[in-house]
Amino acid sequence: MKLEYSFQRETIDLSGFWHFRIDPENKGESEKWYEEPQVSEWDELYTPASWNEQDSRYTWYIGTAWYTRAFWLPEDWRSKLTLIFFDGVNYKAKVWVNGIYLGEHEGGFTQFAFRAEKALRFGESNRIVVMVDNTLTGKTVPPGAGMNATYFDFFHYGGIHREAYLLSVPKVHFKDVTIRTEIKGKDGILDIDLEIVNELEEECSCNVTMQVIDEDEAITEERTSVTIGPGAEKTIAQQITVENAEFWGPESPRLYTLRTKLAHDDSKGDVKDTRFGIRTVKVEDGKILLNGRPVFLKGFGRHEDFPVLGKALHGAVLRKDYGLMMYIGANSFRTSHYPYSRTHLDLADEKGFLVILETPAVGLRENVERLDDPEIVEKVCRMTREMIQRDKNRPSVIMYSLFNEPGSGREEFRNILTAAKGEAGKADPTRPVTFASCRHLDDVALDLVDVLCHNFYYGWYSNYGDLEAAAKTLSETLDELHRRFPDKPIIITEFGAGAIAGVHRHPPEMWSEEYQAELIKTYWEVLLSKDYVSGGHIWNFADFRVGQSPRRTTINRKGIFTRTRDPKLAVRVVKNLFTNTPTYR
Ligand code: ADA
C-alpha cells in the first residue's frame, strides 16, 4: 500500500495513554486479548514513546506486549474510506479493531497503514488493539539475539514509538504524488506523477487541478481530466514549469507546495498538499553537486534517543536539536541507523539540512549466517521501498544509505546490495546510493555505489591514544581509496571518540573531553586537506543509550552533547571548525 497521504485531510490522532500489558508467555493471541480486553487490569503507557523507560519493570523487556485504547469515530466518515496509519512500531505489529484483524507489519522504522472500514463503527466508540513483538533474531532487520546481544550499537527499545492516526479519504482520491525537480536556467521544472484511485462501483470522470502554491498564493495552475473504471487506478504524468524559481539549498531552504484537487460529478473530491523544494543532486567528476555546485557535508550521525521517551523524539527535543546543530554550523546529518520520523525530516526540509537517509539495515555482518539469505533480502528490499515511498519528495534527502557497516568484505554482500540498490532505483532513480563501510580497503562492493561512505575509528578502536598515528592511517587509507575510485566522492560518515562529560586530562587521554575534541580537530584537518573528500559526520551528535557491555559505560559517550544535550568541550571546537568550513567548495 502506498502511504504518501497528506495531512490536510481529516485525521484522528491516537497519541495519548493506551492500556498496556506485557505477554511474556505469548498467550495473548490464543486467549484472544484482541476481543474484549479487561483493561482495568492493564497498565497505562503513553504513545508515541517506547515502553522501556516509562516504568522500570519494562526497561529490559523483550518479547510480546499489547496496547489498546478506545476512540470515537464521527458519523460522517461512513461514506468515505478510513485508513489506520502507524509511523513506527518496533518491531512487529498485529492490529485488530473491534476484534477484527486488520493486518501485520514487520520493521520498526517504516510507516504502514491498513484499510479499516470493515471493522469500524461510525458515530460510535471503537477499540483498537495492537500486539507488538520486539524479539530479535538472526533474521530480523536489524538482527540480534537479545537486549544485551544486539548486532547493532544502540538500545533495542520496543513499542509504538511514533504516531498512530486514522485518516479519512474520499472513494476517489490521490493515492500518491511524486515530484521530481530539474533546473533550467532560472526556472524549476517539475515532473509530477499523480496516482488516482477510484473505489466507486461505477466509472468516474474526474477533473484534476494542480497548483503550485507559494506562500498561500497559486503561482501556476494546470487542469486535466481523467476517466477511471470502477476499482481501477490511473497515473497522470504532468510537467509544470515554475518560472524564476527560488531553489532549495542550505542557505535558503525554499519550499513550495503542490496542491492537487480532484472533482467528479459536481461533488467535492479530494485535496492533497505535497511540499517540495526545487533542487538537483548529481554526482559528477568526484563531486556531489547541489544545484550544480560542489557541496561539503558538515554534521553528524544522530540517533533518535532521549531519556524516558526512548526512541521517540518529541517536537520539543527536535526543536532543541536543530537549534544546536544550527548554532554549531552543521548543514547535514545521516539518519543513522534507520529512517527518522516525519517531523524529524520535515524540519530538515525547512531548515535546509542535507540528509543521508539510511535504511534500518544495520548489523548485517559476522553474526549473520548468510547476508544474501532470501528472507533478509526480502525484508531489506521492502524496508528500502517503504522508506523511499515516504520520503521521496523531500528536498533535504540527497542520498540513500542502504546499509550501515555490513559484512562488505564478504563476496555475498554484493548480492544483497545489488538487490537493495535495484529496489531503490525502481522507487527513485534520481538520488545517489551508498552504504557506510567499515571494511575500507578490504571492501568488495565499493564499485557498486555512487558515493563512498566510510566510518573510521583510528585513534579509538585502533591507534588508540595516538592521534598522530591515527591521522597518518586516516590520510593513507583515504588516499588509497581515492586512487582506486577516483570518480567517487568520499564522505567520512563516522569518526569520533567517547568522552565522559566532566572527565578532563592534560595531555588529552581517551574518555576525556579533551581527547574527543582533539581527535575531531585532527580528523577535520585531514579531511579538509583532501579535495576529493565531500564531507565529514562526527559520531555522534549526542550520547545515546546502548545495551550492557564491557565496552560501554551504560551509554555510548561519543556524543559532543550529553544525552540531555549539555555541551562537552568539543562543542566549541566543532563550532569553530564547522563555521570556518564553507558549504560549497
Ligand atoms: C560503529 C557503528 C555505530 C557506532 C560506532 C561506535 O561504527 O556504525 O553504530 O555505535 O560503531 O560508537 O562504536
Image (tube, rainbow, N blue to C red):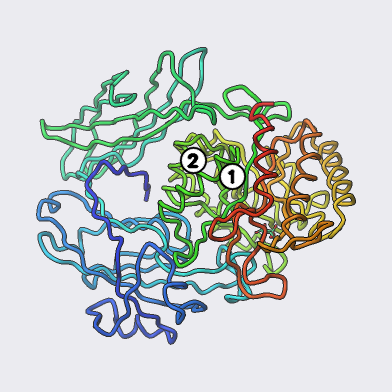
Residue 348: mark in rendering = 2
Depth check: give the residue in front, 202 or 260. Answer: 260
According to the image, label 1 marks what residue?
333
Q: Is residue 110 left or right of residue 511?
A: left
Residue type for callout 1? Phe
**Residue under the point 48% across and 72% down:** 134
- In the rendered image, the vertical position of residue 462 relative to residue 2, given as above or below: below
Would the CB of label 1 be found within 8 Å of ligand 1? no
Mark closer to the chain start, 2 or 1? 1
Estimate the spatial distance between the alpha carbons at disc 2 and disc 1, rounded to whole Å: 9 Å
Depth check: give the residue in front, 375 or 542. Answer: 542
Residue 319 is situated, as x and y percent measured from the top left of the image, at: 45, 47
Label 2: how many Cα within 10 Å (few below 14, some 14–19, many 20+): many
In contact (CB < 8 Å): disc 2 and disc 1: yes
**Residue under the point 36% across and 64% down:** 47
Residue type for callout 2? Ala
Would the CB of label 2 be found within 8 Å of ligand 1? no
Q: Is residue 146 left or right of residue 171?
A: right
Residue 436 is situated, as x and y percent measured from the top left of the image, at: 68, 50
Residue 531 is situated, as x and y percent measured from the top left of the image, at: 78, 30
Question: Ligand 1 is located in which of the four quadrants?
Answer: bottom right
Residue 549 is situated, as x and y percent measured from the top left of the image, at: 68, 75
| Mark 1 secondary-structure assignment | strand
Depth check: give the residue in front, 521 or 452. Answer: 521
- In the rendered image, the vertical position of residue 93 relative to residue 388, given as above or below: below
The quadrant where residue 43 appears: bottom left
**Residue under the point 72% across and 44% down:** 492
**Residue under the point 16% across and 59% down:** 73
Residue 414: mark in rendering = none
